[in-house]
Image: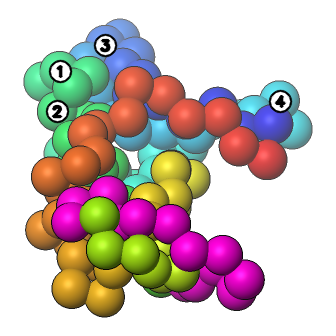
Amino acid sequence: MNYAKPRQVDPKLDKDDAGKWRWTVANRRVGTWAAGYCAENCLGHDTPLAAAQHYHEYQLDHIRLSSLMDTQHPCEKCSEWTSLIAGLPHGDTHTLCEAHRTKDVLAEITSPPDQIWYS
C-alpha cells in the first residue's frame, strides 16, 4: 500500500530543502520518495498545504479522460447526460460532458488532497 501526503524533510539534514515540505509517497517495501512535481526541480515548500497544492497542479496537468461504456450520468457542472468522465491521478473520477471535461473545470470542483492511499 502506498501512502501519499505532504511530509517535512528532516530539518537536521545538510540539504537545501531541510525543513521544507514536499508531496511524498511511502510504503514499507521501498521507503519514502518525493512525487509529482515535488520529485523534480522543487526546492520544497514552507507549508504542507503548499506541497499539496503543488501536487494538485501535477494532478491537473495529468488528467485521465475516459468514458463509461454502458451508462450515463449527469455532468457535475451542467447536468447534461453524458458517459464521459475525467479523473485525477490517484484521485477521484468526475462525470463531465465534452464541454466541461477540462483542467479548468476540474480545478473548480476539486481541491488539493490531504492524503491519498493507493496500491
SS majority, magenta: loop
Q: CA distance from mark 3 to mark 2?
A: 17 Å
Circles 4 and 3 in contact, beta carbons < 8 Å: no
Residue sticking out furthest to the right: 29
Q: CA distance from mark 4 to mark 2?
A: 26 Å
Which sits earlier in the primary sequence, circle 3 or circle 1?
3
Near mark 3 (Cα within 10 A), the count class, few <14, some 14-19 or many ≥20, is: few
Marker disc for residue 28: 4
Q: What's under tag 4, amino acid-wise?
A: Arg
State the residue in front, 53 or 71.
Answer: 71
Residue at label 1? 47
**Rendered view: 53 above or below 75:** above
Helix, strand, or loop for circle 2? Answer: helix
Indicate the quadrant where residue 82 lies: bottom left
Residue 20: x, y in percent?
Answer: 23, 25
Q: Is residue 70 left or right of residue 49?
A: right
Q: Residue at x 17, y 33 (%)?
A: 50
Q: Is residue 94 left or right of residue 119?
A: left
Q: What's under tag 2, amino acid-wise?
A: Ala
Circles 1 and 2 in contact, beta carbons < 8 Å: yes
Q: CA distance from mark 4 to mark 3?
A: 23 Å
Which sits earlier in the primary sequence, circle 4 or circle 3?
3
Question: Does the magenta segment cover residue 90?
Answer: no
**Rendered view: 113 above or below 91:** above
Circles 3 and 1 in contact, beta carbons < 8 Å: no
Q: What's under tag 3, amino acid-wise?
A: Pro
Circles 4 and 2 in contact, beta carbons < 8 Å: no
Indicate the quadrant where residue 47 lies: top left
**Rendered view: 44 above or below 119:** above
Residue at label 2? 50
